[in-house]
Image: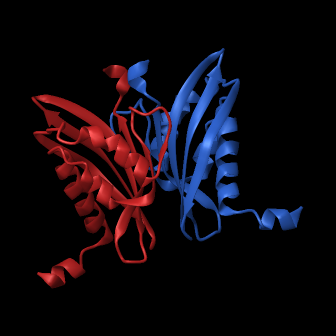
Chain colours: A red, B blue
């Protein structure tokens, strides 16, 4: 229903974009996140020794992940969107279930409202929840 | 020089605010970050099992840290500010030196430009750099 889509809040839109990218990731396809990211995206995850700058570098980082990830199910816990007109900050805890093992993550995504009307990620920060307990 | 201060860029201002709070933290005083944070701040660090919501909860988390931290020196590596009119995203790698040991961090701070003209943190994400290597 077009009317319902137009009335979608920024919160719903941002969470929907993230879930769509995450579901592709969970089936071995990192291009959902790459398509959602701006050329000037910056990125942290626990595998890298310093911040990654730019979509080209992020694309290289994700290349070996293609087809290697299979998450059985996930829970996006307590997603929150803090928005102004031009930016929206999405934070949540993620639980990814792989072969009965659960992986717990902290996630921060910053989206920017681009001139063409799309929301694109300009900052991603993934970190393991309580890594010292592992 | 007032003129120079007025011409300070958003980038310089945000990095200056962060460094001032960090330097207080490094001498056992978490109130620099608390004063810089908005009431609706959300927060991740590796000690907590899920995102912390709100300044009151963050204040409780930081209470035991008072007087317990002594960082000899630090390096804020490659700080970057991505800004629109109302929000600014600061990302950097941090190296904190304590008794010849270095602690390496990934940091994302999101600042919001408040109606009173101040920039306040609405999202903080600290994570250890490459925790699996520890």
Q: Is residue A77 left or right of residue B3?
A: left
Write down the quadrant of residue B70 in the picture. top right
Residue located 65% across and 58% down the image: B11
Residue B53 in sight in this render: no
> What is the x, y in percent for residue A43?
43, 46
Residue located 27% across and 67% down the image: A13
Q: Is residue A52 above or below residue A121?
A: above
A112, B56: nearer the viewer: A112
> What is the x, y in percent for residue A116?
38, 77
Q: Quadrant of the C terminus of chain B?
A: top left
> What is the x, y in percent for residue B103?
56, 24
Residue located 41% across and 25% down the image: B131
How many numbered marks are there?
0
Q: Is residue A41 above or below residue B21?
A: below
> What is the x, y in percent for residue A72?
10, 39
Q: Quadrant of the N terminus of chain B?
A: bottom right
Residue located 51% across and 41% down the image: B107
Q: Is residue B52 left or right of residue B96?
A: left
Residue B33 in sight in this render: yes
B95, B23: nearer the viewer: B95
Q: Residue most toward the bottom? A: A3
Q: Residue most toward the right? A: B1
């Amino acid at each position: 229903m077009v009317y319902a889509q137009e009335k979608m809040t920024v919160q719903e839109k941002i969470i929907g974009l993230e879930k769509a990218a995450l579901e592709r990731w969970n089936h071995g396809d990192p291009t959902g996140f790459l398509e959602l990211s701006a050329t000037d995206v910056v990125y942290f995850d626990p595998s890298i020794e310093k911040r990654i700058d730019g979509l080209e570098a992020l694309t290289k980082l994700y290349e070996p992940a293609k087809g290697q990830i299979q998450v059985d199910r996930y829970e996006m816990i307590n997603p929150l969107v803090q928005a102004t007109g031009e930016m929206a900050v999405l934070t949540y805890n993620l639980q990814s279930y792989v072969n009965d093992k659960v992986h717990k993550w902290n996630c921060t995504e910053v989206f920017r409202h681009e001139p063409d009307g799309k929301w694109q990620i300009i900052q991603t920060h993934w970190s393991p929840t309580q890594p010292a307990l592992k």
